[in-house]
Amino acid sequence: AQSVTQLDSQVPVFEEAPVELRCNYSSSVSVYLFWYVQYPNQGLQLLLKYLSGSTLVKGINGFEAEFNKSQTSFHLRKPSVHISDTEEYFCAVSVGPGRRALTFGSGTRLQVQP
Amino acid sequence: EAGVAQSPRYKIIEKRQSVAFWCNPISGHATLYWYQQILGQGPKLLIQFQNNGVVDDSQLPKDRFSAERLKGVDSTLKIQPAKLEDSAVYLCASTLGLADTQYFGPGTRLTVL
């Protein structure tokens, strides 16, 4: 079975500074990887996804992530954060044909300070 | 394009009572998921439907939880009887096909007292 580990429950950062949210996964088969953001009292919105091809994936709102198969990681990065990026971020993985249900990490709270 | 709709948005019940949640996926989406998100955790899959058939319900506590998707469109998730540990946000998601992006509804926040 697959699992996802988000190493940091909270990441404080100053506005306009770069940020990296870490995500590691474990799986015995090939995976698809996702980052979602959760807004208060709303569902999850997809930021970006890796299915195949280039290991550097660009998403919405200036976020990007890099798939590293040897380190089984899929870290999320943004070169310059804004106050409005203060939200909960979830890394997720899905495996296998036919069943695309997501296995989520426990989430990382990004706290952008002025 | 309308998103995934869920109702009610909030529900408060006493333990041992019953409760039902409703989900209307994006039009044309064949795959529907129910997830449970306990406070401070990531969502966990409860059940996955493909049209009106169950693909995966291995993590559904079948002694108290049930779900159906009649006619392959709307879905209902029921808890009977509820326990304190069922307090969570219940999220519904849908996809056009199995390999596509999952779109999530706003969720139903359940509080069991």
Image: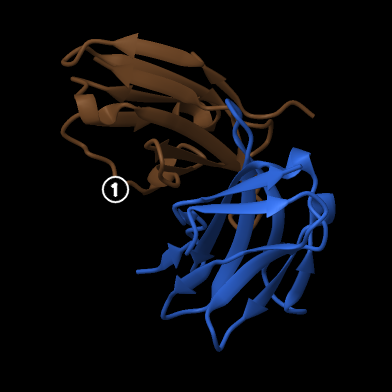
Viewer-closest of A56 and B25: A56
User: Identity of the amino acid at label 1?
Assistant: Gln
At 72% across and 64% down in the image, what residue appears?
A77
Q: Residue furthest bottom?
A: A70
Q: Residue at x 20, y 29 (%)?
A: B64
Element carrying mark 1: loop
Crowding near the residue tagged with mark 1, few <14, some 14–19, many ≥20 C-alpha atoms within 10 Å: few
Q: How many marks?
A: 1
B1 left or right of B13 in image: right
The quadrant the C terminus of chain A occupies is top right
- The chain that appears blue in the image is A
- The correct choice, above or below, for A96 with respect to A83 in the image is below
Query: Splitting the image into 4 quarters, where does residue B48 fall?
Result: top left
Residue beneath the point at 21% across and 25% down: B84
Depth order, front residue of A25/B5 = A25
**How far across and down, in percent of the image, does residue A62 sit?**
83, 55
Q: Quadrant of the N terminus of chain A?
A: bottom left
Residue B102 in the image: state x and y as whole percent.
62, 46
Residue A49 locus on image (x, y percent) = 69, 61
Residue at mark 1 = B59
Q: Position of residue A43 (x, y in %)?
A: 59, 34
**Considering depth in this image, is A82 or B97 the residue closer to the camera?**
A82
Picture residue at 23% right of the left edge, 31% below the top: B85
Determine whether B31 is above or below A19 in the image.
Answer: above
User: Which lettered chain is shown in brown?
Assistant: B
Query: Does residue B54 appear left or right of residue B75 in this picture?
Result: left
- Disc 1 chain ID: B
Name the colour scheme: by chain
Left or right of A51? Residue B64 is: left
Check the image and report above or below for B79 versus B43: above
Q: Is residue B111 left or right of residue B16?
A: right
